[in-house]
Structures are given as C-alpha cells and as structure tokens.
Amino acid sequence: MRSGGWIGLVVALGVLFVAAPASAAGLLSQTVSAASAVDKSCTGAERSGAGVAQKRVIMPSAGAVTARLTAASGDWDLAVIDATSGRVVAGSAYSGSSELASGYAVKGSELVVQACRLTGSASTAKLSLDSTAIDTSHTGKVQLVRVSTPTLARKNALNRLGLDVTEHGGPGFVEVVLYGADDAKKLVANNFAYTLEVPDMSVQAREDRAADAKFAAADATSEFPSGRTSYRRLFDYSQDMKRLAREHPDLVRPITLNHTTYEGRPVEGIEIATNPNARDGRPVFLQMGVHHAREWPSGEHAIEWAYELILGYRRGDPRVRNLVTNTRTIVVPIVNPDGFNASREAGELFGNGGGHATDLDGNGTVDDPEFLLAASTHPNEYRRKNCRFPAGPAAGNCAGVDTGVVGHGVDPNRNYGAFWGGGGSSGDFFTQTYRGPEPFSEPESQNVRELVSSRQVTTLITNHTFSGLVLRPPGIAAQGTTVDEPIFKALGDSMAAENGYESQYGYQLYDTDGTTEDWSYNATGGLGFTFEIGHLGFHPPYADTIAEWNGTTSYATGGGNRAAYYKAQEHTADATKHSILAGRAPGGAILRLTKAFDMPTSQEGLTFTDHLNSTIQVPSTGIFEWHVNPSTRPLVAKSSGRPATGDPSPPEQFESRGATTPCANYDTPPPDCYEDHLITVPSGAGIDNAKATFRIEFAPVSDYDMKIYKADSAGNATGEPVAVSGHGATDGNLGFEEASVLDPVGSYVVRVQNYAGVDPWTGRVTYEGPPPAQAAQEETWTLSCETPEGTTRSARQVFVARGERRTLDLRGDCRIRR
Ligand SMILES: [Zn+2]
C-alpha cells in the first residue's frame, strides 16, 4: 500500500526488535548426484527413488536456513524439509539449475536437504546449507497499548521514554507497541496509565492462518481459476509458472527479468498469447504484484489472471479466446521476491509449527520452540521494502531477524525515476518509504523499467494491498492532470465499478514520487494503474482475497478484480486507445522502434536518460501491424508555462494556535483535531502567482497532516481538498508536509490535522511565477529496419498519435538481400 500515516503500527514494529549479533554456520557444502532426471515436484514433500539426492543436517540453533544448489545444466529444484513433521521449511523451484531456498527452523530439528534433478543431462550439483541463529530467548509478547496523555507535556514525556510510539493517536492518548515487560515497567515507573488494545499481535496472525488452514481443509478447490486454497510461497509461484509453461507451450512463454535481487534471486514471469514465441506486434498488457513484501494478495491476483486466461482459452471461452489471440499478457507476480520470501516465510511459521503455541491464553508462559521462533521472526511478516542491507554497498539479507528487521531496505515503489526524490518519499534509510540512493538504484525497479522499455506495453496494472483504490497518475498534485485524463478516468472508473474501489488520482491519498506508473506512463505513454486491493489488511485470510477476486465482498459493485482485469485487458486490445504502425516490409525483417530522452526527477538539476527499444519481426507475408504507444511522451504533449505578467508575491507565514488534539481519523477528523488557516493569494497589477506552495514544519516526533481547500465567501473550507500532504516526511531534523496548487486564485483554507502532534508547527506559503512558455511538442519514434542478423538497412522518424493508425511502405528502403 502507499499510505504512511495510519500504518504507523507496522512501520514501527522493527525498531526495537534487534537481537544479538547473528552467528552464521555452514552446515553442508558438498557435491551430490542424481543418476537420472525425474520431472516431479520437489517442494511438496520428501521424495524417494530416482532423480533425488538427500542430505541430513541438525539445526544447531533456532534461526534462518539458506540452502543453495548449482548444477551445470538442466532444471533442478531444491527443498529443505523437517524430517519429523514433514513441514517444508524452505523451497526453490526456479527454471534452470541455480536454486536458493530460505526459511526458518528450530534448534535440534533434523532437516532433509533435498536436491531434485527434474530435467537435463547434468547428474551432479553443488549443494550447501547455512544457518543463521535467531535469539528466541527474549521473545516477549508484542502488545499494542493505549497510553493516556491528557496534555502536550505528557505526550512529550512519553516520547522521551524511547518506546515504540506509533502514529495511532486520538484525543488524550497515543498508542504504543510494547516488546516485553521492561517496556511496560517503563510506563508504570513514569506514572503512565494505559489499557491493552491488542494483547498479543501475533494472535491475529495465528488466527488468520488458522482460518486459512480450516478453509483449505474444507474444500479441495476454491473459486480462484487455479482452485488454490492458500497463499502461495515463493517457490509455489515458480512451480505454477513452470507448470503452466510446460502444460501450455502453445500459450505460455516463461521469462526471467534482467537483474537478480540482492539475495541472488531471479525475478520470473510468463507471457501469455497464442503463438507466444512470435516476435509480433500485438498490444501488450502487463500485470504485476508484490512490489511490497507483505502484500501477498497482490501476487495471488496477478498469477490468477494468468490462470484465468490460460484455462479460459482451453475451455473455449470466446471472450478469453479473443483476448489471448489479439493481445499479449505479461504476468510478473512477485516483483520483490527477497522481501516477499522473508515476509511469507515468517508468516508461514504461524500457519504451521508456530500455530501450536502452548500459551494461547496469553498468560506469558510459552514454551513451544516453534512458536518462539514464529514470534521472534514475526516482524519480518510486515516487511514492506526490498532486502538491501546495509544501506551502503549493494548487498542483501532479510533472513535474520537481527539485520534490522523491517527497518532496512529500499521501497521499490519510490525508486522509479520519474519525479524521484521529492516530498512523496523519504531519504532516510530506515523509513518505510526510503527511495534509495538514486533513481532506479534497485534491481526490482530496474527490472520493470527494462521490461517496459523493451516492449510496447500499452496498459499495465501494478497490484498492491490495501485500501480499496484504483489509482491513476499523477502521483504529485502539482503535475496537473495528464493529457490522457479522459481515457485514464474512463478506464479507472469502469474498473472501480467492478471491484467497488475508489477511482482517483495517485496524489489524492497524498503525494507520492518514484512510483511505477508515474514513470511508465510519462516515459512510454502506456496507461498505468495501481490497485490497492481490499480493506482488511496486508494479507487477510485467504478467503477474503478470493472474495476480492470474484466480487463477493460487501462493497464490490460488479465482478471484483477478475472483472476489472477484463476491462483493462479489453482496453489493451482497443486500438483506439493506443497507436498502430502498419504496412508492408520484407518478410523476416526486424523492425525496431527506439527513442531516448532525459526525464526529470523532483531534485533540482537531476535528470536520467531513458532508452526505449522494442522490436518485431515482419511475418513472411510481408504485412505487419504493430500496436505501439504514441510517439510523443505525455510530458511534452501538452503546452506548459506562459509569459509572466508580473512578479510572484513574497512568502507569508502562519503558525499553529496550539489547540488541537491528536486523532487517528485522517478522512473525517473531529473539529478539535485540526486548525484552519485562511490564505488569500495576492493578485492584481504587477503580480503573477502561478504556483503557491504550502508547507508546515514540526519536530520529527510529531505527525501533522495538511489539506488545502478552496475557501467559500465566508472563508470556510469547501468541497474536496485541492491538494493534500500526509506522508510524515522528514528533512534532516524537521518533519514537514508540503503541497502545491497551480494557478491559485482567490482564498484557500490550509487545514492542519493533528495526527500525533506533540509540538507546535510553523507554516508558510511561497509563490512562484510561471515556468517559461513551452508549446506542446511532437516527438517521433526512430523506426529502423534490420536484417535478422542485426544489420540496419534504414531508419526513419515516424510520428503517430494516440488512436492513430499510420501506414508505411518499407519495402523499398529496407530491402534484405539474402
Ligand atoms: Zn504497496
């Protein structure tokens, strides 16, 4: 999800949860052999007979296990299985012969390390297993308490105790996470009264996974197209995609994105189309999940869309047949596999061994070792970011709880280049919206960038959880609506009519920068949407994730996300929504479209260069049709700026009256929770205020949010906010919120909402003149014609508008001599 404010609880979980330094142990490192290849699942259970090599080790301590396998060729898979319980501790089912499996196991458990040779001629593989100890001896219950803080002084005093103070506050209270008896003692010793809100935060996790186990036991199949009844683990995704490619080679082509992750994982996907290996010009729909580690349903919906298309095609469903024939779908269900594996495996403990805690009544005496391990690793279940650690050189490790838990890493959905580095992200490594050291510094965002840059992706959906939103650009209010707003809005609204979500601009939650579709749309012109699936949590019970899919939630107004995705895919197929280059060219020739340009970031003077480069091969008929994005980028397709008619006005200050009470209600706060400040924009002869920027600053321990409204004639806020800022960003030793209004006219109400404020704030509004006048520009694609061997025969500049079909005759200028 995108929000910062009200997820403070999970954001803060990791902060104090730092155990003793890790001790890694190499438990196994040797070459194993399997005389024959047997293509059968390796990650389901222990296997015997041909095609398998097993080694046994004893866990020296409770902790993380990481197994690696490499072979010279073929497809090998890998599993680590608890010999006693049969639980799959870790698994890896990538295509190919390099595997990485990591998970958690308790001290003394006998682990079977199982190497499976599925295909190929290599009969030996290198196998290793390391463990990293996790200290479970100090595992106290993680609790959420509501601390009484009737005055500002008491809030300040609470903040000074060094506890994990959340952003959940309200009139006279702030909520705090307690990590054990010592934390509670601190409250008591300082005369703070508190009530228990959540006696054991892992209980919710256990209840959800217990519900999942019951659900899975009750029915063999679900209403998902795959029939799946429980959340996939990382290796399940690999296995599903591998199986789909194997069973439907006429419809599915496996792909691996260009960059491996910090922990060394490949990022996999599949392409779905009739004749999937053809290099043809059908329009491309991209479906993605799990930029954010804990958002498990987003991967489920992405891969279920693959099943919907493939199985629907096999059934002969005419709607699906039309789409699979006329479009190409790329599904990348897990963009951030390192983070997902860490989150999913921590959560898995509660679904299996960790569910057997002997202290379900919460009396403090828990002695089940698997439960202790589950509780110790539990914070990783709420990891959001990738596994970059430490902050400096590129490395990665999410497995051990003592490496910074949920605090470290980069938010992959703040690391895309366009508008990177503004107020809608953070420059602080330990915050949840850390944008990374530079645009596209992370393998996850670079993978998606290179995928989108090498295809003509005309529509994409990047799935997240949760908030019930269908978001479209812009992510920053000050960018203004896009040139394609009418078609963006029409599609967004029609998808929201199915899943019952709110269809709105990205910035309407608050400004965000460095997000997927703000880059992909502005660089390529392909439409991009973020789905924030559901309302119940990052990974609620699986049955709820199915309900979001098929539209059986209480708020779905149509067929759920399944139906929404149909709308997106049919939009992809609709040539009036993108562009077409068509005509004649020598059969077998390679046509290549390229464009290179500089893109802006949010940081003064910092730009980056994008290179778009996609190809098709002309069919033997010599007649080609290539569905492409418009040649002109959205950023230059509309005119900008104008001549100044005067000077901008000097800044104005405003200050808190100090009379608000914190409340956790972002949308409809009670009147005592906010202050309104009326600002009248100066106007008249010699004045030209083309942009007004509102900014409030406060101590970082506080959290204020800011909303800007138009003022009515009485000076009161009216209508919906015209700009908002509520991410709680920090800049050095300052917390701030900032939002801009373009071409401000008349009076505005600045509403400063007290989310968890403990200190006064100061505000100012600054004015800017208009940017230099720049007329709308037309850009061209460079279209080159190459031999199949790569020799360029010709290149020409081609302009094509959205909705336009441009016919070209390339027979003369790119003749291919054989
Ligand atoms: Zn997200």
Image: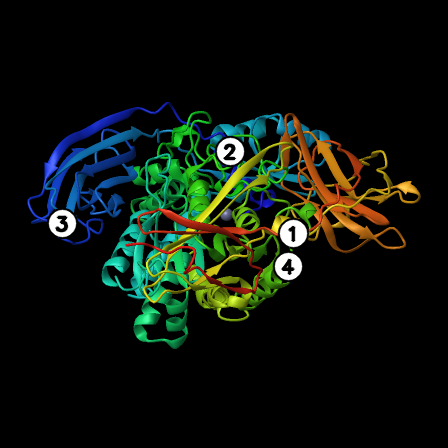
Please tell me the numbered disc located at residue 355: none
Q: Position of residue 712 (x, y in %)?
A: 86, 55
N-terminal-most mark, 4 or 3: 3
Q: Where is residue 382 in the image (x, y as percent from the top left)?
A: 45, 42
Comparing marks 4 and 3, which lies closer to the viewer? 4
Give the amino acid at mark 4: Glu
Rendered residue at 59%/26% (across/down):
161
Q: How many labels does the image show?
A: 4
Q: Which of 77 and 600 is in front in this view?
A: 600
Give the amino acid at mark 2: Gly
Residue occupied by mark 1: 508
N-terminal-most mark, 2 or 4: 2
N-terminal-most mark, 1 or 3: 3
Tags 1 and 2 in contact by the CB under 8 Å rule?
no
Q: Is residue 657 found left or right of 209 in the rendered image? A: right
Q: Distance of mark 1 from mark 4, alpha carbons?
A: 15 Å
N-terminal-most mark, 1 or 4: 4
Residue occupied by mark 2: 436
SS at circle 1: helix
Q: Distance of mark 3 from mark 2, alpha carbons?
A: 43 Å
Q: Distance of mark 1 from mark 3, alpha carbons?
A: 52 Å
Q: How is the image coloured?
A: rainbow
SS at circle 2: loop
Comparing marks 1 and 2, which lies closer to the viewer? 2
Q: Where is residue 483 in the image (x, y as percent from the top left)?
A: 65, 56
Q: Position of residue 462 (x, y in %)?
A: 48, 53
Residue occupied by mark 3: 47
Give the amino acid at mark 1: Gln
Give the amino acid at mark 3: Arg
Q: Is residue 345 found left or right of 682 in the rendered image? A: left
Residue occupied by mark 4: 485
